[in-house]
Each structure stands twice: as structure tokens, then as C-alpha cells.
Amino acid sequence: MKKRLFAVLGVLVVVSFTVVGCAPAATPTPEEVATPPATPTPLPKATPTPPPATPTPSPEEITLTIWADETRAPIIEEIGNAFTEQYGVEIVVQQMGFGDVRDQLMIAGPAGEGPDILIGAHDWLGQLVINGLLAPLDFGDKEDLFLDAAIQAFTYEGELYGMPYATENVALFRNPELVLAAPQTWDEVVEIAAELEAAGTVEQGYVLQPGDPYHFFPIMTAFGGYVFGQNPDGTYNPDDVGIDSEGSIAAAEWLDMMVKEGHLSADVDWEAMHVMFENGEAAMFITGPWSLSRLRESGIPYAISPIPDATSDGRPFLGVQGFMVSAFSEDVLLAQTFLTEFAATEETMQALFEADPRPPAFLPVREKIEDPDMTAFGEAGENGLPMPAIPEMSAVWTAWGDAVTLIFQQQTPPDEAFTNAAQQIRTAIAGQ
Amino acid sequence: MSTVEAKARGPTMPLAPLRSHIPRIALRLLGLAVIDAFTLWFLYQLVIDGVWFLAAAIAIITLGINVVFLREGLYPIRWLSPGLALMLLMVVYPVIFTFYTAFTNYSDGHLLTKTQAIRILEKEQFLPEGAPTYRWIAFSSPDGEYVLWLMSEDGKAFLASPGEPAREVTPGEAGVGPLDEEGVPQSIEGYERLSRIDTVRFISELGKLEFGEPPNTIKISSLDKAAQYQQRYVYDPVQDAMVDPATGTVYRAVEGTFTSLTGEALWPGFQVTTGRQNFQRLLTSPALRGPFIRVFLWTVGFALLSVFSTFVLGLFLAIVFNDPTVPARKLIRSLLIIPYTVPGFISILIWVGLLNPHLGVINTNLKEFLGWSPPWFSDPWWAKAGILLINLWLGYPYMMLVCSGALQAISPELYEAAEMDGADAWQRLWHVTLPLLLVSVGPLLIGSFAFNFNNFTVIYLFNKGGPPMAGTLTPAGHTDILISYTFRLAFASGRGNDYAYAAAITIAIFLVVAAITMFNFRYTKVWEEVSESV
């Protein structure tokens, strides 16, 4: 009996290996690996011709797989159905977390099990392109229907890798009952904050959480600072780290002053920042469209305006979300056609906007938007700088964020904190 | 029971029992056959996917299972084989794979195999400046041949088929019928115009074809665009290099990246073994000269203090609730175990919320009563205290459980004898309880030390290693332990994720932990001697 039990156990063990090991191997595509690299001088006559078109093969022979997050998946499913109806090409939508799409693509793509189309953010480009995971695309005339900055954001080393659908950027939020007019400069912000704090109306006039370089960037640009220098064609130059540039240090010194004068506190984190604004304990802060639903729910009055200026324009980071096509797709052109014919339409883009309101990148929809919040974000993002998509950016976030935190905590003088952060970034980029 | 054993009992043994075993043997063989069939199918999938390493490991394990089940002499091992197989696959294989990875360049930019990288690079194409682009319409013949009708921007029309030069044609020539209002022939002899639906359906196939005579071939690049695209790079196996035919630049394969003489690199690169490079980088890295010592000291301190504090509190509670005179001791003891049953992930996040300087219950109350509250997340020492506090909460129930069990095992006679000799409570604890307790609990303390040495979860969830250290060569935080510091080094490098480097550092940490553990085990032998002499 027992021996038999073990035989059964043995089978179970191997089955479990199979199940565990098989997870990524669920849809093996043998052609993927079996195909030899393309011959240098292609011999067209030897190229296998596709099956004749007249006797139409059954629809399930051609499939496009799309990876989308929970917000986008139902919409893609819907337009997928329309596409299937019209062209007999099956669309399979696989839902996964927004960030998981990138991580999973790195594993599944090279194994030949990835998607044909994926939805993601433009700042993934650098990492995905140096890993050879994205196919360059050509949208022809359709390109003109998109916001130029969004197309630029999805362009990497001269090639276009994605179809944008939404842009996002931060803007200055203020409580219009406490701050009547939108401050135009950071000096005004300090003035208003000092007044409100002195009068005891609020705990803090303006709030910012420590260690958050993303929300500090607009202040840094207002003082003329930058992260990576830009080449004449607008691309970022990893050899020109600007964290210790004159403007960046000026911004760091401004931050130091704010902390020293008690206008900013090291204790306020993201949650506290929100709660303070929602309770009327703070009058101004910087945030993006992701905060809207929360603020609307809280019932606190708010107004959105562009980032204030200082010695130069305050410019937020511009993030762009869009569709990309996997380099390991067998049907890159079909995927591209799906995007140009079915995604780049007013209905689809409108649906994507309604599911997750952010300023659309598709101009016909963008121009029709009536939501005043969206218009305000759009205005605040007009001079936005695309978030660097170069892989070197991964060396920047922690070092830069630590420097901001050290100033908040008054551990290090501002110039020293930023100079050291720049040094850390240069060391990491040099690959040591 | 088996045939060999039956035979071994001697020739006088009747054949009947042997016969009765035949169904069992058959069943066993059938079981093995099923396992082998599964494995073969699975291996086939793995080999197709190019996962040689895992395929080899599974092949060896399955072979082992077969040997164990077929050789009668290995009968006792059969009982262990499921466990052994799982251990090989889930423990030994990952360890070997980590070692292997440490000697490669597996990282962002080097995820693909060389074949894949070459394929991706050879797909890269460009349109020479000023080259004309065409609108196209595809026609297909009954035997699956395609021709393209190309319309240039200046109003000319061309017919292109694979392998033959594209030529300008006017209606009437070459079987081309009259044009419709779009300028597309209504018929081409022997071909039929591809409907829009089929054009979309087969566009990827059409995209793989080259129309016209090499090298001047035309390819389609979208639903309404075709042009003479040129391949940007060609792989030359003789030089093991990618060559740019337009400029003649040669990009040789250097450590997993095709690099030109001027140092220009082509991406993607590919995976290769790079020998000791990752270890060399680790030893010469500024990360080692920089905050490493401080991080290392805190790692040891954190692990030691965590073990010590949880042990002291656990032992104290165990002793208290070991006393039958304590009222409701079973209920209280059960309640005290609760922190152990809540997943650490959740407890830590709850604690982080409680300690929040602005909103947390603990801090808001302290502020109310004392007018001051500890800056748990911004002060280096308070952050360390906070982490130790959370880890104490997470760890004491385990120590209490272990000590409760061990206390029961100490003979009451020893205490009686000690009392007779005039030992007070402290002396009994110090000279009787502790030495005997440590014999059984000692190895668990060492285990707990090793666990906390690599306790990434609590560090990362508390404050991601922060608050940051000032003026370091690489970013590091005051509460970073080696493993969270490694995470920073490997996944915030200049080019994204560096898995190979992470593997190398992990091995280095493994050596450190192994050395400390060995030392500790040797030390605990002292306690065993104590127990022997009692």
C-alpha cells in the first residue's frame, strides 16, 4: 500500500514541477525559437509565401494578444470585438497590474510568450529598448493626430515605439477660499504661506513631502535646475547630470530656507500632505490627476493652476501613457494596423479618457474636453519636460530623493547634499 | 516487498508470493512511466524555449527517481525521494543557478541570447534620405503569389513582385487592366485584388516579403506605406560582428555587446559568461569603500539585538506563564501568540501607520501628553529603535513558544536540588534554567540570527532603509542592512537592473552568514558540554 502511495506521490511531485515550471510555458510558440536569424541578403524567392488569400483560413489562426491593466482592459476588449468582427482576427486581452506589464514582458518577451501589444508608460522605453523588447512603429499620417510632445516622449533614438493615449503632469493645487489668486512665483507662495501661518488659518501654507524628487522637480526647474541636459534634438544626455547645476542648487537652497523658516516639515508624508489639504490645514500643494477623485470626495474646494516660476519657468515632468508593440510579436504589422485603425479613433480615445480622466494625447479628443480640471492640467503641462526615459534614470531617483530628504531633515547643507547626489549618480552611471 | 527480496529469502521460497507482487510491480512501472512521460513532454517544452539549465536539472532529478524506484537496493531512499526531488529543484537548483548567474553579465541590456539579439538587430531598417514612398495595393494569385501595385507620390505606378525588378507599367501592359478612380487596376492577369479585410489579416505575412529584385527591394511598413527600406546591420559570422553596410562600421561582440572600435554600442546586447568580473567589481566598488562598514555593523547589531530582545521577552513570558499560579494563563498565553499568526507584511505596515509622525496614534498621543514624539522615520537612532521594536513584536511569540516547550523538559528535581543548596531565584535562572535551555534553544537562536541577518521585509517596509546617510559614495540609509543595501546597488545601477551583480553580492553575503553561523554552532558546543556534565 505504502509503496503505491509513494508512486502516486511521485506522480504528484512531477505534476507539481510541471505546473510550477509550466506557468510561463503555457502558450509555447515553437516557431519563435526555431526560426534562424534572418539571412544577411534575403532571397525573396526562398521566402515562404503565405497561404493563398482566397480560401480564407479560419479566423482563430491569427490572434493578437494585448496586455492591459484593469482600467484599460474592458475598453480594449470592446474594440477588440469590433476588430474581430470586421477582420476575423481574434483579440485576446490579458489583464495585469500596470507595473507588472513591464516586469512580465522582460521575462515572457524573450521566451516567445509575451503579448503583441502592451499598454504602458513612456519612461519604460529606455529599459525596454536596450533589452530589445520593443518594435519600432510607423503610424504614417495618423501621427499628426497626436500631441507632438506625446509623440516625442514615445520616440527613442529617433524611432517611434508607441501610440500615446494620455499625458499626465503635476500642477499647483490651492484652496481658493484661502488663496484667492493663483500665485505666479514661488516668492508669492512663500509670502502667502507666511501670512496664513502667522494668522493661524492653516498649519502650513504650502506642503511638500520629503524624499519625493518627482514633486520637487517643478521647483527645481523654476530655479533653472535640470536632471539630465538635453541634446539639440530634445533627447537627454546621460553624461550631463544637472543635479548639482547652479539652478538645482538654488532650488535646494530655497527648500532649505523653507524648512528653516518653518514653512515645510520633515514629518509630512504623502498621506499627511493629502489629509492636511483635505482638512483645510494646508492651503497649497503640488499633485497630479491621480489625486482628483480623492479631493472631489473630500469636498474641499480646490483650484488648479500652472507651477509658479522663480528665476525661470516652473516645468513639471510630463508622463505619457500609450500602446507599444513587442519586438517578439509575430504580427508586428497587424498589431500596428490594429492601433492605427481601431485605437487611434475618437470613440476609443474618448472611452480611454472617460475610464481614467487624464489629458488625452489624441488631439481630436483633447480639443473637445470640457472638464475644467483637465484643461487646467493641460495648461500646466504645456511646458512640461518628458520624464527621461533613458536607462540611466534608474540611478537618479534614490540619490536625488535622499538629497531632498537630507535637506528636509537639516542633516546636510543644501549645496553639499545636491553635489553629493550628483556625484553618486555619476558614479553609478560610470558603472562602478 | 519486491522480487529481489523474495529471492533473497532463499530458493526454498515458494513462487506464490512473487506472483502476488506482480500487480504491484506493474503499478509501480506504470507510475514511473507516467512520470517519465510527463517529464519528457515537459523537457521538450523547456528545450524548445531554450531553458537548458532547468531542463538538465529536471532530467537529472527524474533519472534519479527512476533509478531509486527500479533498484531494489535503494528501497529505503524511495521514501525520501519526493522530498529529495523537491529539495534539489527548489533549493539546490536555485543555488547553482545563482552561482552561475554571478559569473555572467545577466542584466538590463543583456537579457537576450546572442541569436535573439542578432535577430533583433538585423530587423532594424531605415529609409535612405530622399527615397520615395509608395501607397500600395496587394494582389494575389490562386497559388499564393503576391504582387504589389505601388503608387508613388508623383503619380507614377509600379508593379513589383518578389524576385523581379519593379517596373513602371501603364494599363494594357503585362496583363494590367484599366484603372479605377483610385488609380488601381481593376484586374491584373492571373491575380486578384486582395480585399481590405484580407490585406489587414495578412499584413504581417506581406510585411515579411520583399518585392522587387535584391538589393533594391520594397517592403511594406504600414497599411498605406511601402518603400525601399535598407537593412541597417548585417551579422558577419567570420568576424563575429555586426556590420553597418552603409558606413562600413564593424561592431564586434565584446562581452555581450556589439561594440565599434570607437566604443559605440548596439543594443540589445546578449548574455555571456564574464568570469570573475562581477566579484572584481564588488571588491573594487566604491560601495565597499563607502558606507559598507556602517551597513555591515548595523546588520550584525540588528540581527543580534533582534535575537536578544525577542529571546529575553519570550523567555520572560514563558517563565511567567509556566507558573501554574498565574490566573487565566492559558488564555493569555494564547492571546500573546497572536502577533505570530498575523502575516509580518501586514503587521509591519500597521506599525508604520501607528508610528507615523503626523497621523499615527502613538505619535499623536505622545505629542499630546509629552509635547514631543520620537521622529521614527527621520532620526537615524529612532529609526533603528523603531525597527527593533517592530521586530520584537514580530519575534517574541516564537521565542515564547520555543522556551515554553524547552522549560517543560527541565526536570523539577534540579530546581529542588538547587533550592536545597540555597540558590535564590536568580541563581536558579542563571545556573540551571539558562544552561539547560540553551542546549535546545541555542541552535534556534542561531537560526533566528541568520534569518534576521537577511530580514529584507521588515527593513524595506519600515522605511526602505532610510533615513539616508549624508555624504556617502553610493546611496545608503541608516537602517539599511546588507541585503537591502544590495538591493539598492543591484537595482538602481546606471543601467537599470543588474541581476548578475546582485547574484555575486548575494554569494558574498551568503559566505558571511555561513561563517558567522559556523562560528556560532561551534560556540554552542560549549553548552552541550555543560548539559553533559550536569
Image (cartoon, rainbow, N blue to C red):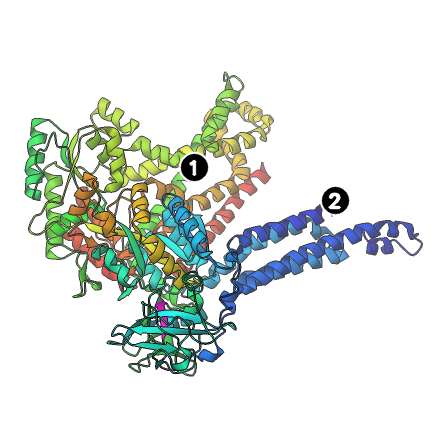
Relative side of B529 to A106, left or right: right
Disc 1 on helix, strand or loop? helix
User: How far is mark 1 from mark 2, CA to CA?
Assistant: 39 Å
Which residue position holds label 2? Answer: A2
Classify mark 2: helix, strand or loop. helix
Answer yes or no: is residue B508 visible: no
Return the chain for callout 1.
B
Q: Is residue B398 above or below residue A397?
A: above
Q: Quadrant of the C terminus of chain B?
A: top right
Query: Residue at image x 54%, y 26%?
Result: B418
Please give the name of the residue rendered at 27% of the width and 34% of the height, measured from the top-left corner.
Answer: A294
Please give the residue where the numbered disc 1 appears in the rendered image: B344
B246 sits to left or right of B198: left
Residue stretch rendered in magenta on the structure = B213-221
Across and down, in percent, residue A145 comes to: 24, 56
Q: Position of residue B273 (x, y in %)?
A: 44, 69
Q: Is residue A138 left or right of residue B303?
A: left
Task: Name the amino acid type tagged 1.
Answer: Gly
Q: Main secondary structure of the magenta part?
A: loop
Disc on res. A195: none
Against B495, residue A353 (above or below) is: above
Q: Is residue A193 left or right of residue B89?
A: left
Per the image, is B370 magenta? no
Q: Residues within 10 Å of mark 1 (few under 14, many from 20)?
A: some
Q: Are marks 1 and 2 in contact (CB under 8 Å)?
A: no
Residue B388 on image: x %, y %: 36, 37
| Mark 2 residue type | Lys
Q: Residues within 10 Å of mark 2 (few under 14, many from 20)?
A: few
Residue B220 lies in the magenta stretch = yes
